[in-house]
Image (cartoon, rainbow, N blue to C red):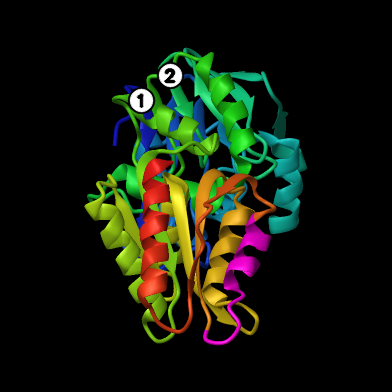
Amino acid sequence: MQITDDIKYIGVNDHDIDLFEGQYIVENGMAYNSYVIIDNKIAVMDTVDTHFEKEWLENLKAIVGDRTPDYLIVQHMEPDHSASIEAFTQTYPDAVIVASAPAFTMMRQFFNTDYTDKQQIIKEGDTLNLGTHTLQFVAAPMVHWPEVMVTYDAKDKVLFSADGFGKFGALDTEEDWACEARRYYFGIVGKYGMQVQNLLKKAAALDIQTICPLHGPVLKENLDYYVNLYQTWSSYGVESEGVMIAYTSVYGHTKAAAELLADTLTKKGCPKVVVADLAREDMAECVEDAFRYGKLVLATTTYNTDMFPFMREFINELSERNYQNRTVALIENGSWAPMAAKAMRAKLEACKDITFAENTVQIRSALNEGSRAQIEALAEELMAK
C-alpha cells in the first residue's frame, strides 16, 4: 500500500487471533500497522507482533531492496507493535532506534537490553531530518501508555498517531469504522480522556492531511469526521441521542421489564433504544453503547444482598473508564428484599456528573400492575429529560 510517494505500508493482518489483549473479541482479526519512509535516509515506523515478524521483514525488504534502514522509530511499546524490535536489530544491526526515554526502559524489561549502543532518545518537540522529510515528535503520555510519542511528517503532512484513531479488524475486511473504533477507544483508551484531549489540542496546530494509526485503516478523507468523534469520546460527550437498557435476568422477569420499557420508549418516540443482556452479549459492545448514548437504564436482580455479578462487572467497566455526564435510571427485582438499586447507585455515585432518574422501578418477583405503572412513569421521565 502506498500512502504517499515516499511513505509505504508494510504492516500485517492477523486472522489467527480470537481475543485482542486477551479480552476483546475480534471476529475480523487485527491489523498491526507499520510504515516506512523512503528518503535520503530510511525510517521505519514501529514493528509488529512477534508471530508476524518474518512477514513484516519481508514486506520491509520488498520496499527497501538492498538499502539499509537508518532508523527504527518506536512510538509505542505494547508488544503488538514492539515485539519485533529484536528481529529488526538482528537484520539491520547498524540502524538507530529512536524512542522516548521511558520506551527504552521498557525495552530493557522486554528484551533485557535498552540498545545503548544504537539508541537515540527523543522528547516533545524534537525533530529528525531524513532529507526532504522532517519528522516532528509529539509526546502523548497515557494515550494510552506513558512512553507514547506520535510523529508528524511535515513534508507529506502525515500524522503517525500510534494507537490513536485505531480500530479492531484486519485491513482485508469490510466493516463500519465508527463501530469498531468506538469499541476499541472505550475499551482500551477510554480511561484517558483528558490525555487524549491534550493530544488533540497539539494536533490541531498541525496541518494534517493523512492519519496513519497502528491499527485499522489509513485515514485520508473527511478527517474532521474522525477528529470530531474523538473530541466527543474523549470529552465524554453524548454521541447519539437515545437510551441504552442493560439488564441481567435469572428467570426472565427482569428481562421482561427491560423489554417493556424499551417498547414503551419506542412508542413514545425515543430516537434509539438499545437493549443488552449483560450475561450473553460482548461486554465491550455494551460498554461502547453506554458511552455512546446519553441515558442508561440498569435493570438487575438482587443477588446475595447486592446485584447480579454481570451487572457488577458492567458497572466496574464503566467506572474504570471514567463514565460521566449521563442520566442513569435503575430497575431492581427482588422476591423478598430488593437491594439491587441501592447497590448500583452506591457504585455509580463515585462517577462524575451522573444524574439519577427520580423514578426507580421495583419489581417483586414478576411484573404486576404497580411495576408496569412505574415503568410507564420512568419512560415519561426519560423522554422529558
Identify residue type, mark 2.
Ile
Q: Which mark is residue 208?
A: 2
Residue at figure coordinates x 41%, y 53% from the top left: 289
Circle 1 residue: 223
Is 341 a magenta residue? yes
Query: Over which residues does the magenta segment extend?
Result: 335-348
N-term mark: 2 or 1:
2
Total tally of numbered discs in the picture: 2
Residue at figure coordinates x 32%, y 27% from the top left: 220
Q: Are marks 2 and 1 in contact (CB under 8 Å)?
A: yes
Q: Residue 252, position in %: x, y?
A: 36, 82
Asked if residue 354 shows in the view, the reply is yes
Q: Residue 211, position in %: x, y?
A: 41, 29
SS class of the residue under badge 2? loop
Name the main secondary structure of what is drawn in magenta.
helix
Camera-side residue of 271 and 21: 271
Q: Residue 55, position in %: x, y?
A: 39, 54
